[in-house]
Image (cartoon, rainbow, N blue to C red):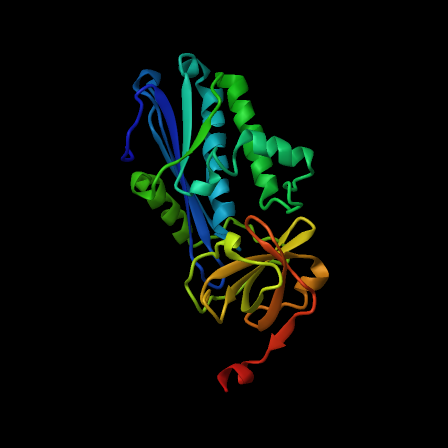
């Protein structure tokens, strides 16, 4: 059994994902299902992999979805075992994917009504997986009369699922390419965290280096790291259109000016200027 506190009357699905930031961005997912004693079912431990073209958030969501689908499969085999079940908890060690954040049912409903854009007009990343998770939760509810709650649980309490996801990552044979069309990932040269967007101001100029570009519906998320000034080494997300992202190449450096600051990203003016490496080295 995983560590942490367990309610003896609750069914738990512990999920995790692991990936290598290598040339293939390979990864795997794992989950364990822990049944209450009264259900008299053997606990489940499974891993799935090897994925290539992975992204850690997509993998974490894939792990949650796989775990819930496994529960539906078991329900079809043992429906009578679920009669007295009252609580289902799905855990993830990625805090931004719990019910307080991205998998919140009310947020998903709002995004769906808004064609998968948030109130700032930002396209929602991995919307197809969020949509599938929402529908799968409702299927579980319709069959078991329990609505699964998705909760954050620190990694130290998720050791079994973590071990399983790493086993999936190590599989020699790939099961699928989950890279988004057009996504391009390069190595970072700094290891700083994400900027505090509240501290950014429109018209501020930054010297940045592009390390990742990812399509998000009809927008592009360009991930950059700041190469100069007090925010040196921190990363920043720029949302832009297809035409603009074509001007921003991986591993290239640019001088940019912030046009508008949002909660978790910025928009920039189109008149960016590339900074040549030889000028940096002088």
Name above or below for residue 16 compared with residue 256.
above
Assign the N terminus to one quadrant of the image. Answer: top left
Name above or below for residue 275 compared with residue 219.
below
Residue 274 image-quadrant placement: bottom right
Residue 227 horizontal/vertical position (percent): 49, 70
Name above or below for residue 175 compared with residue 235.
above
- Give left or right: position of 189 versus 255: left
Residue 92 horizontal/vertical position (percent): 41, 38
Residue 220 horizontal/vertical position (percent): 64, 55
Number of dots carrying numbers? 0
Outermost right residue: 243
Residue 223 image-quadrant placement: bottom right
Q: Residue at x 47, y 31 (%)?
A: 68
Residue 47 appears in view: no
Outermost bottom residue: 282
Residue 233 image-quadrant placement: bottom left
Residue 151 horizontal/vertical position (percent): 42, 33
Q: Residue at x 32, y 40 (%)?
A: 160
- Give left or right: position of 159 versus 266: left
Residue 199 appears in view: yes
């Amino acid at each position: 059994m995983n560590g942490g506190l367990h309610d003896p009357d609750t069914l738990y699905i512990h999920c995790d994902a692991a990936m290598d930031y290598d040339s293939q961005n390979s990864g795997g997912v794992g989950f364990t299902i822990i049944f209450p004693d009264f259900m008299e079912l053997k606990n489940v431990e499974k891993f799935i992999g090897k994925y290539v073209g992975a992204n850690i958030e997509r993998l974490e969501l894939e792990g949650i979805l796989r775990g819930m689908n496994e529960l539906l499969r078991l329900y079809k085999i043992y429906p009578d075992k679920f009669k007295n079940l009252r609580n289902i908890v799905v855990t993830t060690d990625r805090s931004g994917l719990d019910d307080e954040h991205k998998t919140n049912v009310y947020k998903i409903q709002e995004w769906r009504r808004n064609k998968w854009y948030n109130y700032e007009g930002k396209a929602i990343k991995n919307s197809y997986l969020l949509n599938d998770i929402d529908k799968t939760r409702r299927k579980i509810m319709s069959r078991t009369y329990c609505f699964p709650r998705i909760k954050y649980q620190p990694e130290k309490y998720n050791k079994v699922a973590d071990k399983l996801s790493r086993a999936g990552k190590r599989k020699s044979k790939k099961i699928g390419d989950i890279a988004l069309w057009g996504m391009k990932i390069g190595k970072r040269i700094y290891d700083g965290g994400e900027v505090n967007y509240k501290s950014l101001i429109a018209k501020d100029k930054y010297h940045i280096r592009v390390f990742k570009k990812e399509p998000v519906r009809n927008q592009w998320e360009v991930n950059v790291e700041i190469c100069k000034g007090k925010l040196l080494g921190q990363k920043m997300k720029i949302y832009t259109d297809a035409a603009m992202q074509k001007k921003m190449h991986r591993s290239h450096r640019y001088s940019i000016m912030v046009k508008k600051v949002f909660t978790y990203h910025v928009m920039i003016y189109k008149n960016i200027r590339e900074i040549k490496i030889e000028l940096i080295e002088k």
